[in-house]
Image: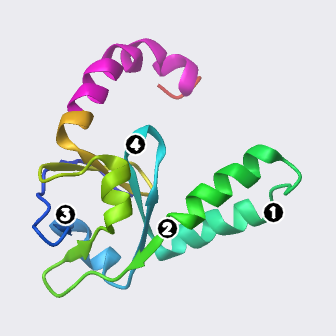
Amino acid sequence: MFLGTHEPRLDEKGRLFLPAKYRDELSGGLVITKGQERCLYVFPVDEFQRITEALRSAPVTAKAVRDYSRVFFASASDEVPDKQGRITVPAGLRSYAGLQRDCVVIGANTRLEIWDSAAWARYEAEQEQAFADLSEEVLPGVL
């Protein structure tokens, strides 16, 4: 499970330090791809394989499945962190998420998300009240 908020910076070569607490878990490899709201999703390989299986079993006749799969897989990049725990974020993905230098990496349960720091600040400010208002509807009977 991925938790927390971290604030690494991209270097001039497009590399990003993974949060130290997750480096061991991701040391064998990971997959970066486009996420919703113009962020990037970072999946451990086994979680990416689980999603792949779910999409493989989804009906190919459904246009939404085809559209999502095309963008999701076409933008995916498999990476192996270097000895310092850095990953290279491909230029196309950096462009999609608007990543310049200051980034935010958040834990999002089964994945990490990489955000441009200004975009994350805007998103978080917009969503805080919605979070407070919707907790019962999202997890009925849990919280």
Q: Which residue shows up at 37% across the image and 59% down it?
A: 93
Of the two numbered discs 3 and 4 in the rendering, the one whose residue sits closer to the viewer: 4
Label 3 to label 2: alpha-carbon separation:
20 Å
The three-letter amino acid code for the residue at tag 4 is: Arg
Whether pointer 3 and pointer 2 mark residues with C-beta atoms closer than 8 Å, the reply is: no
Q: Is residue 69 magenta?
A: no
Looking at the picture, tell me which residue is in the foreground, 18 or 87: 87
Q: Which residue shows up at 38% across the image and 62% down it?
A: 92
- Residue density around tag 3, few if under 14, some if 14–19, many if 20 or more, within 10 Å: some
Query: Where residue 19 is drawn, which disc sits there?
Result: 3
Q: Write down the residue under mark 2.
A: 76
Q: Write down the residue under mark 4.
A: 38
The spot of residue 34 in percent (x, y) is 46, 54
Looking at the picture, tell me which residue is in the foreground, 23 or 79: 79
The spot of residue 3 in percent (x, y) is 30, 50
Query: Is residue 6 in view?
Result: no
Query: Where residue 57 is drawn, which disc sits there?
Result: 1
Find the magenta span and give its range: 121-139
